[in-house]
Structures are given as structure tokens and as C-alpha cells.
Image: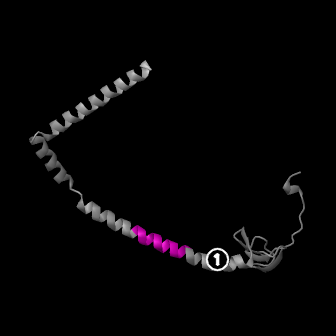
Amino acid sequence: MSAEDVACQNTDRELWREREGDYYADSIHVTEQGGIGINCGGHVLVRTLREWHGLEARLAEVERDKQASLGAWSAAEARVRELEGALPTQDELDRAWKALRQMGFIEAASAMLHLRNALATSERARTDEAEEEK
């Protein structure tokens, strides 16, 4: 037997309905347990009186949090703009690259990187051999 096959008695007490007799219209009711239900567009929210009353304070709290977050976001954006202003332009980077290449630093750095990688590979190979001997 499904839930659709079971008859239920409506124990809610209706306080207001937008259009009398239209059961799809927005409405306000009190449940048997004392909750206040608001039906708006077919979606019903039921809360106790204290919960409904506390929503305004909660909304104010959320608004304060939102404003604090927006302030922090604005400060972060300002800091990003400041840092972006301190970064070199692409043209400046291109000129620096060309100057370093002319002085031989690029090739030297590349050679150092290859040497470091070769040493690391050699060290890994020795470590692997030592592990295999154990």
C-alpha cells in the first residue's frame, strides 16, 4: 500500500487564503502541533512562532556577514591590483630575457639545471641500487 492510498485527516487550521476555495492559492495555517505554515506558490514552510520571529534577527546577522565578506573581498581586490602594478610588463620581461641571454646567463642557468637533474638522477640510481642490495 503506497502513501497515496492512505486517507489522512487534515488537522491544520487555516487562518488566511488568498482566494477562498482555491486550494492552490497562497495561504497561512496553524498545524496541530502549533507550528505556523505559510504556503506560497505550492511550497510550504512550517516554523514555530519563535522561529518565524527570529528570522528577522537571523537575516540581519546574514546581512552583516555579507557586508563583512564584501569588505574583505574589496580589500583583497585592491591588494591584487597593487601587486599587479608591481609586476613587470611583458615588454620589460622580454628586454630582461634578451639582456640575460646576451650576457650568457641563460645558457649557464640551463647548463646548471641539466647538471642538477643529472646529479639527482644519479643519486636516485645509487639509492635504488642500495635498496636492492639489502
The residue furthest left is 103
Name the residue at 28% across, 65% down.
82
The mark total stands at: 1
The image quadrant that residue 87 belongs to is bottom left
In the image, taking residue 67 as reference, residue 35 lies left or right, namely right
Residue at numbered disc 1: 55
The image quadrant that residue 36 belongs to is bottom right
Q: Which part of the image, by quadrant, shows the C terminus?
A: top left
- Residue 26 in the image: x percent, y percent? 73, 74
The image quadrant that residue 22 belongs to is bottom right
71 in magenta: yes
In the image, taking residue 128 as reference, residue 59 lies left or right, namely right
**The residue stretch that appears in magenta:** 62-73
- Residue 49 in the image: x percent, y percent? 74, 79
115 in magenta: no
**Compared to 126, does 116 lie above or below?**
below
**Label 1 environment density (alpha carbons within 10 Å; few <14, some 14–19, many ≥20):** few
